[in-house]
Image (cartoon, grey):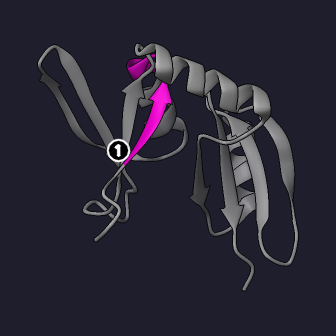
Amino acid sequence: MRISLVPVIVKDQQEALHFYTDVMGFVKKVDVEEDGRRRLTLVAPDDPDGPQLVLEPNDNPAFATYQRALFYAGIPMVSFRVKDVRAEHDRLQEAGVAFSIEPGGTQRAHVAMLNDTCGNLVQIYEEPE
């Protein structure tokens, strides 16, 4: 068993596509219309056959409620591992990304939290060697 699809609930798929590709650096894998819904997935550029991030619209009331609850509780919708949290923070901040938690950490992990502009908090983390 492997992780294949990881949903991220978003307010607007097109806005999310821009943010997650042009700003975060992911690559579009699937973009098709199925039964009147857009199926939109992304992958890491260095792992095109790896797990896919599914940009799932929050048009379902349960999704919208869940998304808002996580955001207002300060809980990230998703976490991404990076090689260097400080360098990634600086790169994203230069691109205009707002951070709610600046880089910091413990012996276990270095983390930062950002607003994806699509209704979510996203955590980036680095595991110290």
> Which residue appears at 45% of the width and 19% of the height?
58
> For this rendering, which residue is in front, 28 or 70?
70
**Could you tell me which secondary element the residue under label 1 belongs to?**
strand
What are the residue bounds of the magenta stretch?
6-15
Q: How many marks?
A: 1
Residue 3, how many percent across, how many down? 35, 62
Is residue 86 in view from this perspective?
no
> For this rendering, which residue is in front, 37 or 124?
37
The N terminus lies in which quarter of the figure? Answer: bottom left
**Hey, which residue is sitting farthest front in the picture?**
62
Is residue 80 in view from this perspective?
yes
The image quadrant of residue 41 is: top left
> Which residue appears at 28% of the width and 33% of the height?
40
Is 78 above or below relative to 106?
above
Is 10 above or below relative to 75?
above
The image quadrant of residue 109 is: bottom right
Looking at the rendered structure, the kind of residue marked 1 is Leu
Is 76 above or below relative to 59?
below
Assess disc 1: are there few (<14), some (14-19) or many (≥20) residues with their C-alpha within 10 Å of its C-alpha. Answer: many
The C terminus lies in which quarter of the figure? Answer: bottom right
**Hey, which residue is sitting farthest bottom in the picture?**
129
The image quadrant of residue 126 is: bottom right
> For this rendering, which residue is in front, 122 or 22?
122
Horizontal arrangement in the rendering, residue 6 relative to residue 77 (left or right): left
Horizontal arrangement in the rendering, residue 38 relative to residue 34 (left or right): right
Residue 55, how many percent across, how many down? 39, 33
Dot 1 corresponds to which residue?
Answer: 42
Residue 7: in magenta span = yes
> Which residue appears at 67% of the width and 42% of the height?
76
> Which residue appears at 51% of the width and 31% of the height?
19
Horizontal arrangement in the rendering, residue 68 relative to residue 18 (left or right): right
Residue 114: in magenta span = no
